Each structure stands twice: as structure tokens, then as C-alpha cells.
């Protein structure tokens, strides 16, 4: 008989080895993907993924199901990523602390022309979005990955990161705008639509806040009226919208067969204990 998610969790917490293996094996790809995006170093990501699953097996009986299993595991992944950085094993100075508010220096992406090979073009675009997200400081990267790439709600992101929802949204808006700036060449936004004018409002921040339900109806109406008569701001909002679509549809870094095997071995080792 097929178990419901609730029944599977209950069986796993009672010590049913098959239930534990089934529960965590289903979550392992998310664990590995988040670790890869946050660590940006294959060996570190592999170690974090293994440590996460071992810790999950050990602490599963204490999980109170106040959040989803995925959210709980993201919390564990993040804690091990922080430990990796404190050990000084990551390759990027910008990753020295999850509390560092300074993002890494922006790196221009090469302009991409349409290619007849759709798969190749998709792969190139995926690499561009991963590169842009990777250039964010960790405190911004983690909220954007969880909210716009993994699809968690703002409250779930706050629960996973131990932040207030308003702090999550503030970081999210900054992250979205920074990634959009990185992707401007790839999105082929005309130069005449990328400049700033003193008379225009901050439409990018407003649009991002609108997506999180933070904008009052009258403010939304005023923004729509402005966009209707300002091609520059309309172009900026369109490019942000396209950026978020790319975030949502990006498959993420490929998890190598060797990493998958290491994760499976770590899970089996933890269960054997």
C-alpha cells in the first residue's frame, strides 16, 4: 500500500529504515542542487550534501514537522555551507560570510546571439543565469535560490534561514535586480532602454515588491500608468520579468554521477549506524 507523505514521515521517525531511505532519497537531488549553488565548488558541495543527509538521519526523530521536510533540509544544508566557509575551504572571497552585505564585483556576460541549436542555446542561457546568481553574495544568493529557483514561499524561506519575512523580501529585491543587471547583455535589452532618468521612479524595486504583494493598489495603478508612457521603464520591467522566468526554469547545476554515488553511500552509511 502506498504511504501518504505524512505516513512516510511518521514511519521514518519511528526508525523504519526503508521509510528513512525513501524519504531522504527523494529529497537528495534538492539537497545536492542547493549545496552546489551555494558552495560553487564541487568537492565542497559533495561534502555538504553528504553531511546533510547524515545529520538528517541522526536528527530525524527530533523533526517536529513545523515546516516541510525540504525546508528543514535546506536549513541543514545552509548550516554546513557556513561551516565550510568558516574553514576557509571555498574558492571565492565573497563567500567568506553569509552576513557579508557586499556582493562580488559584477562580471560582464558575453552577448548571446540566437542559435539554431535550441538545446545548446538553452544550455548557454542556463549557464548564464547560474553564473549571475553565483556572483551574488551568499546572503542574497540563498534567498533568491530558495524563493525564485526552488519555489519556496517567502515564509518558508524565512523559516529555512532563520530570518524575518521582511528581511527575506528586502534581500530578495536586491538579488533580483542584481541578477537582472548581470543578464542585461544576454537578454539583449536595447541600450536606449537601459539608462536612467531623474523623472522615472524605481520601477525595478517596485515591480519586485509588487510580485511579493507589498504594493498598495494605488501605487500599482500609478506604476502601470507610468509604464504605459515610458518605454525605458517598460523595457526594464520586461527584462526583470524574463530574468525571473529564467530563474524559475533553470535546471540548476548538473549533479555528476560520482556525486550522486557519494550521496547514496553517505545515506547508506548513516542508515547503517
Image (spheres, rainbow, N blue to C red):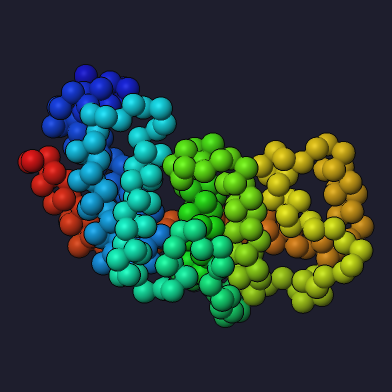
- Residue 106 percent across, percent down from the top left: 58, 75
Locate residue 262 relative to residue 187 in the image: left or right.
Answer: left
Evaluate whether residue 264 shows in this view: yes
- Residue 228 percent across, percent down from the top left: 89, 54
Q: How many marks?
A: 0
On screen, 21 above or below 16?
A: below
Extreme residue toward the left, this view: 272
Locate residue 135 relative to residue 237 in the image: left or right.
Answer: left
At x 7%, y 41%, the residue is 272
Q: Quadrant of residue 271?
A: top left
Locate residue 87 relative to residue 71 in the image: left or right.
Answer: left
Q: Nearer the viewer, residue 144 or 2?
A: 144
At x 55%, y 68%, the residue is 103
At x 86%, y 55%, the residue is 227
Location of the N terminus (image quadrant): top left
Q: Nearer the viewer, residue 265 or 95?
A: 95
Locate residue 200 relative to residue 81 in the image: left or right.
Answer: right
- Residue 273 percent across, percent down from the top left: 8, 41
Q: Quadrant of residue 34?
A: bottom left
Evaluate whether residue 119 shows in this view: no
At x 92%, y 57%, the residue is 229
Q: Quadrant of residue 210?
A: top right
Q: Nearer the viewer, residue 63 or 199?
A: 63
- Residue 262 percent across, percent down from the top left: 18, 57
Amino acid at each position: 500500500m502506498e504511504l501518504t507523505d505524512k505516513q512516510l514521515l511518521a514511519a521514518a521517525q519511528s526508525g523504519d529504515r526503508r521509510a528513512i531511505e525513501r524519504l531522504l532519497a527523494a529529497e537528495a537531488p534538492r539537497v545536492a542542487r542547493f549545496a552546489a549553488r551555494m558552495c560553487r565548488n564541487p568537492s565542497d558541495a559533495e561534502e555538504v550534501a553528504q553531511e546533510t543527509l547524515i545529520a538528517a538521519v541522526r536528527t530525524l526523530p527530533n523533526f517536529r514537522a513545523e515546516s516541510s521536510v525540504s525546508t528543514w533540509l535546506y536549513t541543514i544544508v545552509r548550516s554546513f555551507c557556513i561551516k565550510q566557509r568558516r574553514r576557509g575551504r571555498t574558492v571565492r572571497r565573497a563567500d567568506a560570510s553569509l552576513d557579508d552585505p557586499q556582493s562580488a564585483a559584477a562580471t560582464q556576460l558575453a552577448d548571446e546571439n540566437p542559435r539554431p541549436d535550441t538545446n545548446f542555446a538553452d544550455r548557454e542561457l542556463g549557464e548564464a543565469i547560474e553564473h549571475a546568481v553565483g556572483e551574488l553574495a551568499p546572503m542574497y544568493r540563498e534567498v533568491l535560490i530558495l524563493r525564485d529557483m526552488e519555489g519556496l514561499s517567502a515564509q518558508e524561506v524565512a523559516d529555512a534561514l532563520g530570518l524575518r519575512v521582511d528581511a527575506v523580501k528586502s534581500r530578495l529585491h536586491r538579488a533580483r535586480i542584481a541578477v537582472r543587471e548581470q543578464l542585461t547583455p544576454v537578454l539583449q535589452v536595447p541600450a536606449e532602454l537601459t539608462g536612467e532618468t531623474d523623472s522615472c521612479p524605481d520601477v525595478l524595486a517596485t515591480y519586485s515588491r509588487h510580485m511579493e504583494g507589498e504594493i498598495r493598489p494605488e501605487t500599482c495603478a500609478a506604476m502601470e500608468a507610468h509604464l504605459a508612457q515610458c518605454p525605458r521603464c517598460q523595457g526594464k520591467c520586461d527584462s526583470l520579468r524574463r530574468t525571473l522566468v529564467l530563474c524559475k526554469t533553470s535546471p540548476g547545476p548538473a549533479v555528476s554521477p560520482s556525486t550522486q554515488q557519494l550521496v547514496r553511500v553517505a545515506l547508506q552509511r548513516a542508515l547503517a549506524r
